[in-house]
Image (tube, rainbow, N blue to C red):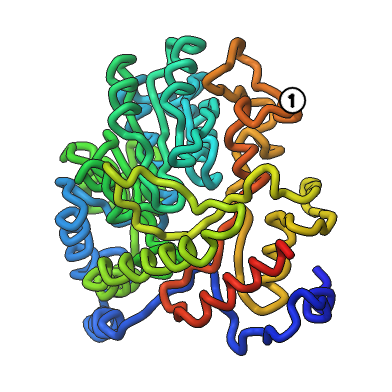
Amino acid sequence: MDRMRYLKDPRFAGIEPFENKLWLSSPTVHGEEQYWVDEAIQTNWISTVGANINAVEKLTAELIGCKYAVALSSGTAALHLAIKLCGEMLYGRPAAGHGTLEGQRVFCSDMTFSASVNPVAYEGGEAIFIDAEYDTWNMDPKALERAFELYPDVRMVVIAHLYGTPAKMDELVAICKKHDALIVEDAAESILATFKGKQTGCFGDVSAISWNGNKLITGSSGGMLLTNNEAWAAQARKWSTQSREDAAWYQHDELGYNYRMSNIIAGIVRGQLPHAWEHLEQKKHNYELYKKGLSDLPVKMNPYDEMNTEPNFWLSCMIIDNEAMCRQVRSEKEALFNTEPGKSCPTEILEALAAFNAEGRPIWKPMHLQPIYRFHSFVTKTSDSKVRINPSSGSVHTDVGADIFKRGLCLPSDNKLTEKQIDVIVDIIHRCFM
């Protein structure tokens, strides 16, 4: 990206780069975190046991409304153990050297980060990707129902809530129950978000949240496995500590992992938790300012069902109307576009923001378009075969995820943004359409 191209462009005359970089979503630390971290250090409990871990598990379960929370090293670790738990429940304990999903297919959200689906491969399974829908950008219930028609033997579904917006969980849960399938709920991005008054993380048979550095609440890293099944929680804790048996020596009857959260990380999370709702309100304020400021442009904000859903507004996103898209071409690693009066595209807007020292991001590239998963099946609501539809067909309705990826972008969404800074970001976006 040629920064000077934008700084010299007459369309952006009078705009000065931000003195300090505006981040997509950075940690917001308040001070209580230091207290609990210091206590861990002073009492010499800095490993994978300690009061902070115990407290964070209890506080998280109470905050979200589930019975058990298991503190782990990352949201990915939580997803891995969640998928492993469901796999053993469905298919039994695997033979030595085999994953719990060896030879099994799993339905997965297509519009998500790769951490949602990679654990299926860890366990030897094959992810089948389910297209998104325009109402929430999440898994399309109609596509999921179609997938069960094509693959009636599938017994596990991994559902992610994109950018903090809940999926249509009443429909998705009903479909999974109808087909006797377990749900792994990826609520990594959606802590505190609710669907019909119930928090995400409470819909899955096993669920996962993330404390990554850019999330609403952070420990710098870390995650949680959530469940109402006491035996499953105990099994996850065992696996997370290398599956060590209750013996005076190191004895192991099954494969384990180094997935337990440290007491230091738990201390940061413990200090963050009292500020959870405060962070949500700040994120929501960002979203509303963007929605108002961009209302006169041919764009829309990432949608949600205002009657039944309350997102956590982790990231504010926008999607450009089809007729307002200038020509944009993406390779695997690069993008090109042609500037056109009255039109723009995600590449131009993101480059313009970056030139003025503000961080945005493309929408997650759908999993079925990722090189690593190019040969996996992809199911849309109109699928009539087990082969994924070619998105180059021209119809935006045959591949919703690819269309959202093409036209959408994530805006700077840090909860420390000021109204003045958002006004400047909105102004830059307006000028991209000049």
Which image quadrant is residue 221 in?
bottom left
Residue 405: % across, % down: 63, 45
Q: Looking at the image, which is closer to me, 275 or 135? A: 135
Q: Residues within 10 Å of mark 1 (few under 14, many from 20)?
A: few
Which image quadrant is residue 279 in?
bottom left
* Vertical position of residue 271 compared to residue 65: above or below: below
In what quadrant of the picture does the C terminus appear? bottom right
Q: Looking at the image, which is closer to me, 202 or 409? A: 409
Residue 19: % across, % down: 61, 89
Taking the spot 55% from the left edge, 54% from the top edge, the residue there is 318
Taking the spot 27% from the left edge, 71% from the top edge, the residue there is 278
Residue 129: % across, % down: 54, 29
Which image quadrant is residue 283 in?
bottom left
Which residue, given by chain and number where applicable, does mark 1 sit on?
Answer: 393
Taking the spot 46% from the left edge, 29% from the top edge, the residue there is 140
Taking the spot 68% from the left edge, 64% from the top edge, the residue there is 350
Q: In the visual, does 80 lie left or right of 64?
A: right
Residue 222: % across, % down: 38, 61
Secondary structure of the residue carrying numbered label 1: helix
Q: Looking at the image, which is closer to me, 333 or 143? A: 143
